[in-house]
Image (spheres, helix red, strand yellow):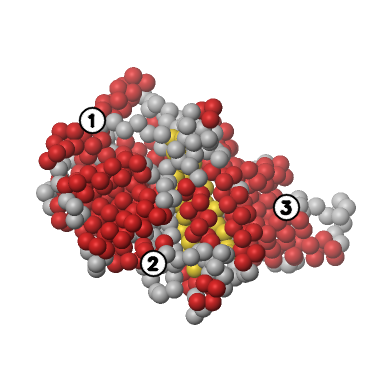
């Protein structure tokens, strides 16, 4: 669901302003919570209050740095020192949420609400947590209570509007989105979300105005550029569409979705060579950057069986691939690992015209859109220090156990999208390029719910692309099959992607870019041997392929746990 995934803002940067600014202003002389006895204040009370403030301030700094697990420890100390102070529980809950421990986060929010029922921030964060779990009704109740307590907060109003949209109450959603823009006219997110709703309603002119307003207030808003490009393409103006897609790719070169839309637009303009060049960079698996930096990102689509036995058919391949990548970290190097998981309702791919007709009928009959299951997402982050082989093995086992628990928590009849980013050495502090991730565009606006609206940009044109093969499949060039394979890769459908890449190779045996894509598909399945074969084939055809060389270099890195001497060779 596009809106619920992207616009449950609870903007992190806003939370930093609202909470941390107040916390940093507190001095040790401020005493929080209950005294030892009514009317009494002891030296111990003052000491504990001062310590709690220091812990909250340090936890705030850690949150700003993205060190969520460390922030949990600091906030937990603050809560221990001052258990009756609601803000400590709010901050501990926020740190739990960002580290992926949503149930623990909700317990802290509830404790904060029990201590201070008028704490609008706690109600908002509880609403975000319910939204993550897919409980729209409870989420809405929390947002509305937060709105009642803080009606001037545009982010809370936007959150409530997002849930109204997910429930199909479009009139309420429009009311709330417009009010959010009115309350904070300079925030680009609110213009963008209003534009998405206008676009969904077929009000393209209003959508264009909103997206342009978003760009006015945030010129680096790549999502807005993509949406504008899609609007022009729907309207039949391919030249303008290409212009905006090009801007998006220049702004975020690692956005494979932007490359997919740009390349497909080039194909429709008859520019196959340009399309092939654009697609090439979408299949890069190895990191860009300085020597010694390693990275890997990958995505996969969980293949679930029937409702009674959904886990039995879940392949172990991706999990084992994650494990192998962790094992490759040299023992004398520290690393940071980020894992994103999104639980996606299985979409029904139908032509755009059919979607528009369905939407029109739904609006005419009830003024409501059908309820659509929400996407949910979570990020887990792990810090891995330099350590012995035995300690590293235990740490990896703990990480895999935690990821497996999250992965198995997927709702029935949903697909799990998982991506992993691993950076070592200096890349821990400053991220360089990554290997393969559908959208490596960062989180410029600090959204609390991982955005999955980009999938709509793939779903929108994939039926049209597939339909063109049904009409003139045998006449399509290799580049068209390349586009189809990339579209399937972006959605984690490795089986269909391999079939498409095979189609490209059957039409052009020298289509080395198809072998690059094929390697991605094999890696998604955890089959590194076949991925290696694909990249070796690339170099047979094109010995200058930098992407294939980097892919082979990464995949050839041995496990540091099973080969401790590799750490010695890796010393700087």
**Identity of the residue drawn at 72% across and 52% down:** 85
x, y percent for residue 526: 44, 50
Q: Is disc 2 placed on a helix, strand or loop?
A: helix
Q: Nearer the viewer, mark 3 or mark 2?
A: 2
Q: Nearer the viewer, residue 134 or 268?
A: 268
Q: Nearer the viewer, residue 571 or 31?
A: 571
State the CA–CA distance, disc 3 to disc 1: 55 Å
**Identity of the residue drawn at 68% across and 61% down:** 74
The quadrant where residue 24 appears: bottom right
Task: Answer whether labels 1 and 2 touch (C-beta < 8 Å).
Answer: no
State the CA–CA distance, disc 1 to disc 2: 46 Å
Q: In the image, which disc is placed on residue 353?
A: 1
The residue singled out by tag 3 in the image is 85
Give the total of numbered labels.
3
Lateral position of residue 512 relative to residue 52, left or right? left
Lateral position of residue 191 relative to residue 92, left or right? left
Q: Nearer the viewer, mark 3 or mark 1?
A: 1
x, y percent for residue 135: 54, 34
Residue 570 vertical placement versus 343 (above, below): below
x, y percent for residue 62: 59, 64
């Amino acid at each position: 669901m596009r809106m619920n995934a992207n616009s449950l803002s609870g903007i992190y940067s806003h939370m930093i302003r609202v909470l941390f600014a107040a916390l940093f202003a507190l001095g040790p002389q401020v005493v929080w919570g209950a005294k030892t006895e009514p009317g009494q204040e002891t030296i111990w009370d003052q000491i504990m209050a001062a310590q709690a403030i220091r812990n909250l301030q340090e936890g705030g700094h850690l949150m700003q740095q993205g060190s969520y697990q460390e922030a949990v420890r600091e906030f937990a100390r603050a809560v221990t020192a001052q258990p009756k102070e609601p803000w400590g529980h709010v901050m501990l809950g926020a740190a739990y949420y960002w580290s992926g421990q949503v149930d623990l986060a909700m317990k802290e929010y509830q404790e904060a609400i029990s201590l201070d029922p008028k704490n609008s921030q706690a109600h908002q964060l509880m609403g975000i947590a319910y939204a993550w779990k897919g409980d729209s009704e409870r989420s809405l109740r929390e947002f509305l209570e937060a709105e009642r307590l803080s009606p001037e907060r545009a982010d809370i109003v936007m959150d409530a509007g997002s849930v109204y949209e997910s429930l199909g109450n479009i009139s309420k959603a429009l009311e709330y989105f417009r009010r959010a823009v009115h309350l904070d006219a300079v925030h680009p997110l609110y213009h963008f979300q209003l534009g998405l709703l206008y676009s969904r309603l077929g009000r393209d002119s209003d959508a264009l105005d909103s997206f342009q307003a978003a760009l006015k207030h945030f010129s680096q808003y790549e999502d807005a550029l993509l949406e504008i490009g899609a609007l022009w393409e729907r309207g039949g103006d391919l030249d303008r569409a290409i212009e905006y897609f090009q801007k998006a790719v220049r702004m975020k070169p690692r956005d494979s979705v932007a490359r997919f839309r740009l390349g497909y637009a080039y194909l429709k303009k008859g520019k196959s060579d340009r399309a092939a060049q654009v697609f090439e960079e979408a299949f890069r698996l190895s990191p860009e950057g300085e020597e010694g930096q390693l990275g890997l990102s990958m995505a996969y689509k969980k293949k679930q069986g029937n409702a009674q036995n959904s886990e039995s058919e879940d392949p172990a391949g991706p999990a084992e691939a994650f494990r192998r990548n962790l094992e490759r970290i040299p023992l004398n190097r520290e690393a940071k690992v980020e894992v994103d998981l999104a639980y996606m309702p299985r979409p029904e791919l139908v032509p755009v015209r059919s979607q528009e007709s369905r939407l029109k009928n739904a609006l005419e009959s009830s003024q409501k859109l059908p309820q659509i299951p929400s996407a949910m997402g979570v990020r887990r982050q792990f810090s891995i220090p330099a350590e012995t082989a035995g300690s590293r093995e235990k740490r990896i086992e703990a990480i895999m156990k935690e990821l497996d628990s999250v992965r198995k928590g997927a709702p029935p009849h949903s697909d799990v999208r998982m991506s992993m980013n691993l950076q070592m050495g200096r890349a821990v502090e400053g991220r360089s390029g990554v290997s393969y991730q559908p959208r490596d565009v960062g989180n410029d606006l600090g959204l609390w719910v991982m955005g999955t609206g980009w999938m709509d940009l793939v779903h929108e044109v994939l039926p049209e692309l597939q339909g063109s093969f049904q009409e003139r499949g045998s006449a399509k060039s290799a580049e068209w099959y390349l586009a189809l394979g990339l579209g399937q890769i972006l959605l984690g459908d490795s089986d269909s992607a391999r079939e498409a890449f095979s189609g490209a190779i059957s039409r052009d045996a020298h289509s080395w870019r198809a072998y690059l894509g094929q390697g991605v598909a094999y890696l998604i399945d955890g089959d590194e041997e076949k991925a290696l074969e694909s990249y070796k084939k690339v170099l047979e055809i094109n010995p200058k392929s930098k992407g294939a060389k980097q892919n082979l270099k990464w995949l050839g890195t041995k496990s540091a746990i099973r080969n401790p001497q590799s750490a010695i060779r890796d010393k700087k």
